[in-house]
Image (spheres, rainbow, N blue to C red):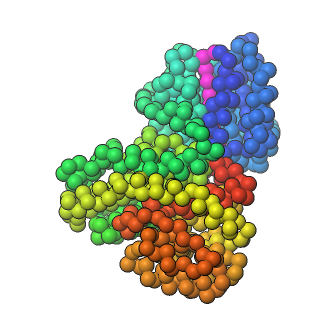
């Protein structure tokens, strides 16, 4: 997804811009660009559209500005949405006069209509992007004699969609104007300079104080400070927030890549997520809440909305909440929820699960849930993210920054947080006694140690991946909470190794997927000891009878279920509802090694972005 940075306040800004863009690499990009203003009324634009080399190209081109005295600048990494990843489509985008430039993250939904009108009125466009519409709209407003700030206030009302953008103009080169609507945008300062950015890492080492903006804010940033305006044009506030992430924590810390580092960070991430959340009374604390326990007691249904890996965490939560609270739990892919008339009312608790807290589909689902009158909770990793601010309550996963595009530590942290929520609800509903909650919580806090045991199997799992590295199809099967684990294992393998992989409930094999099994297929079976153990063993027999290779993920004592030529990866036995926290780890490691064996870039898989802020 697109990354944004803007700096005002003088100095060697070009490097600050490209350094900031480097730290946004994890958002995915296919082109990059900057615009800077120089004293004397000059604006210079540099852009590169060379896939993952775009930033390197931009860095070398902008060397020429190293000693230039720059007033202000904006920078952008683009992940193509409207128009291909070409140079003309790379941001920043000029107006006709080339005195004004804009960068955007998001989509101007009515851009085609606006573009048609602008062309009729004589504007000429050089790109296929929706962003260029913003430049021309602002130009048109400024031609009436108003400032860029006033132009942004007016033009923002003419555009529909979730977007944040920053504009810069030669009329006031020391000022940046930003607009935020349902796409991330923060401000920061180091006392001398001010920054606008799409997210924290871009300015983490450059700013010391950070601020959030509300949706529909217009912000004017100069070296002297900031003015914020609400949707109706009146002065508004920004909110300071504390960033306790260090740059070091966003670096690889000796690992070859972020994904392996983050897989190994799981015990610590989960410990942090669980730490101090249980009161001696059996009460579990949410981070920020405006939902009283009385209101939660009136809830008669839970609805979980999420995408991708977060959805799989939500699926585990469905099993736990239904078992521990006896309340029905519905689960929806966020992009389905908002378009299908979900049955939600003020007695429904809608839980939005999202690492970033910015995924547009989930954010929109959360908006929809609020419109329908539901009580809402966001489970997310990024403090102060859009979802965290929109929901009535927040439960943060405290996993720290996750740079690898494939979610790992945030997934196990999500499951941990959701299990806490399930326990909280069960206590409020009176379905579990405080001592039962206490027991499960204490089993939960033992899980990070169990994950450490699985991490010790790193090399063994690599050898298993090596054995099957030439196979072309992988099927992950599981039952009960083993099913979401199977889905997650398949998703991890697909997204970083590009091998065909599917997850199935094991009992469903015989209803179709078994037709795909032959001697080229590999089946990975989740076979932890639960009351369904015997059934999964029967499913493994079905697989064997079709000559497919078998890898079993199981507990100590179950080794005998494998036959010659098959592989057994042992994971510690834990409470069945907590097992996904442990059982998913060998699947992450398997996917990681398979991708490395195939020579793939595990941190930046093709076609994927870390945060998907478009629909
Ligand atoms: C997979 C992955 C994605 C995300 C999905 C939701 O490894 O990372 O499937 O889980 O895009 O993102 P968040 O959790 O930020 O809402």
Percent x, y of residue 299: 28, 62
Question: Toward the viewer: 110 or 223?
Answer: 223
Q: Main secondary structure of the magenta part?
A: strand
Considering only vertical position in the picture, is 522 above or below 499?
below
Q: Does residue 483 belong to the magenta stretch?
A: no
Question: Toward the viewer: 554 or 122?
Answer: 554
Question: Toward the viewer: 18 or 538?
Answer: 538
The stretch of residues the image draws in magenta is 1-10
Question: Is residue 467 at least partly visible in the picture?
Answer: yes
Left or right: residue 162 versus residue 35 is left
Left or right: residue 558 versus residue 488 is left
Considering only vertical position in the picture, is 367 above or below 556?
above
Q: Going 72% across and 27% down the picture, which residue do you hit?
A: 35
Percent x, y of residue 308: 55, 59
Q: Going 23% across and 62% down the picture, which residue do you hit?
A: 436
Question: Is residue 309 at least partly visible in the picture?
Answer: no
Left or right: residue 76 versus residue 292 is right
Quarter of the image for residue 513 reads bottom right
Q: Going 68% across and 72% down the picture, which residue do you hit?
A: 473
């Amino acid at each position: 997804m697109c990354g944004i940075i803007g700096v005002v306040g003088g100095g060697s800004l070009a490097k600050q811009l490209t350094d900031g863009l480097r730290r946004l690499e994890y958002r995915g990009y296919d082109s990059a660009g900057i615009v800077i203003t120089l004293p004397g009324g000059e604006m210079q634009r540099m852009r590169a559209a060379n896939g993952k080399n775009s930033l390197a190209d931009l860095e070398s081109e902008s060397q020429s500005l190293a000693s230039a005295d720059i007033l202000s600048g904006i920078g952008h990494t683009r992940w193509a949405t409207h128009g291909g990843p070409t140079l003309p489509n790379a941001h920043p985008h000029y107006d006709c006069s080339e005195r004004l430039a804009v960068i955007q993250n998001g989509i101007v939904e009515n851009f085609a209509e606006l573009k048609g009108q602008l062309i009729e009125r004589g504007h000429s466009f050089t790109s296929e992007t929706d962003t260029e519409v913003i430049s021309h709209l602002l130009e048109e407003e400024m031609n009436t004699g108003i400032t860029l700030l006033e132009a942004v206030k007016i033009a923002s009302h003419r555009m529909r969609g979730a977007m944040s953008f920053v504009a810069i103009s030669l009329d006031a080169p020391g000022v940046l104007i930003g607009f935020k609507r349902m796409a991330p945008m923060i401000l920061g300062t180091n006392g001398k300079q001010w920054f606008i950015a799409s997210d924290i890492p871009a300015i983490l080492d450059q700013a010391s104080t950070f601020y959030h903006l509300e949706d529909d804010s217009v912000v004017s940033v100069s070296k002297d400070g900031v003015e914020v305006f609400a949707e109706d044009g009146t002065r508004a506030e920004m909110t300071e927030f504390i960033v306790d992430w260090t740059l070091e924590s966003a670096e690889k810390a000796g690992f070859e890549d972020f994904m392996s580092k983050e897989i190994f960070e799981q015990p610590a991430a989960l410990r942090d997520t669980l730490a101090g959340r249980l009161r001696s009374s059996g009460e579990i604390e949410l981070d920020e809440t405006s939902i009283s326990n009385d209101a939660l007691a009136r809830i008669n249904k839970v609805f979980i909305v999420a995408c991708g890996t977060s959805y799989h965490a939500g699926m585990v939560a469905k099993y736990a909440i239904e078992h521990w609270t006896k309340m029905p739990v519905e689960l929806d892919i966020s992009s389905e929820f908002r378009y299908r008339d979900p049955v939600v009312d003020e007695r429904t608790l809608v839980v939005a699960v999202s690492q970033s807290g910015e995924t547009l589909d989930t954010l929109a689902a959360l908006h929809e849930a609020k419109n329908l009158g539901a009580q809402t909770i966001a489970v997310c990793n990024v403090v102060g993210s859009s979802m965290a601010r929109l929901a009535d309550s927040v439960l943060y996963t405290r996993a720290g920054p996750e740079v690898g595009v494939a979610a790992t530590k945030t997934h196990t942290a999500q499951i941990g947080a959701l299990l806490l929520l399930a326990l909280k609800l069960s206590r409020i509903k009176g379905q579990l006694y405080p001592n039962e909650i206490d027991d499960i919580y204490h089993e939960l806090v033992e899980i990070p140690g169990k994950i450490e045991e699985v991490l010790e199997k790193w090399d063994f799992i690599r050898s298993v991946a090596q054995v099957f590295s030439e196979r072309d199809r992988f099927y992950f099967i599981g039952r009960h909470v083993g099913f979401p684990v199977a889905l997650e294992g398949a998703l991890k393998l697909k997204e970083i190794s590009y091998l065909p992989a599917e997850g199935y409930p094991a009992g469903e094999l015989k209803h179709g997927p078994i037709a795909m099994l032959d001697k080229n297929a590999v089946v990975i079976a989740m076979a932890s000891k639960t009351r369904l153990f015997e059934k999964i063993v029967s499913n493994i027999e079905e697989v064997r009878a079709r000559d497919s290779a078998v890898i079993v993920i199981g507990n100590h004592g179950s080794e005998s279920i494998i036959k010659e030529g098959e592989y057994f990866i042992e994971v510690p036995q834990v409470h069945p509802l907590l097992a996904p926290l442990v059982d998913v780890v060998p699947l992450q490691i398997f996917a990681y090694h398979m991708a490395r064996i195939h020579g793939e870039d595990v941190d930046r898989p093709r076609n994927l972005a870390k945060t998907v802020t478009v629909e």
